[in-house]
Amino acid sequence: MKQNIDCKKDNLRSLSIASGIILILLGVTALLVHRLEVDAYLVLLAGAGLLAVGSVFKKTVLIVIGCLLGGTGMGILVYAGPWNIPTGNQKGLFMLCIAIGWFLIPLFTRLFMGKTLWLAFVPGVVAVILAGTVLATNDFWIMHGFLLIRSLSALITAIELILIGSALIVPWRRMNKHH
């Protein structure tokens, strides 16, 4: 029983520290936005912060979200970053950046968690195929197919975020009911 209480205190402490680091990173970033033109880097910075916290505290969900935000942040830089990428290539390169985020998940979970989330390769491969298709052609139907898939992807991502958020809240509610 004593061991269980100590474990809960350690988990609560880790969560508190991780939350604190994330809030500090967000605060520093918010301050920098007003001083420097770093708004294009916000998602990438948030992803890097979550990835760092997840790696240090060995939290799979933070590593996964950090990898996905990192890939999305790189994709945002394709559009708004300093690279001046031609407009015709931006959509395909954005999808490649998203794929990189998915491919980082198995790498970081293997390095820091001792297990590999192989399933992340599936959406990564789909993103690479879509990126190749978009880069290979500017065909009207393929672009509309891309928009449809992107809309479905946004819906699925929103549902995933809701489920992950619920999964994070439910254990705390159960713990509070027992006390």
Image: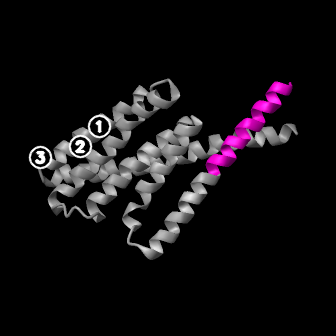
Report the predominant secondary structure element of the magenta stretch: helix
Q: Are marks 2 and 3 in contact (CB under 8 Å)?
A: no
Q: CA distance from mark 1 to mark 2?
A: 6 Å
- For label 3, the residue is 136
Residue placed most toward the observer, 116 or 135: 116
Side of 13 relative to 98 (left or right): right
Q: Is residue 32 above or below residue 43?
A: below
Q: Is residue 14 magenta?
A: yes
Horizontal and vertical percent position of residue 61: 54, 39
Q: Are marks 3 and 1 in contact (CB under 8 Å)?
A: no
- Checking the image for residue 117, the label placed there is none
Q: Are marks 1 and 2 in contact (CB under 8 Å)?
A: yes
Q: Residue at x 33, y 53 (%)?
A: 74
Q: Is residue 84 magenta?
A: no
The type of residue carrying mark 1 is Val
The type of residue carrying mark 2 is Leu
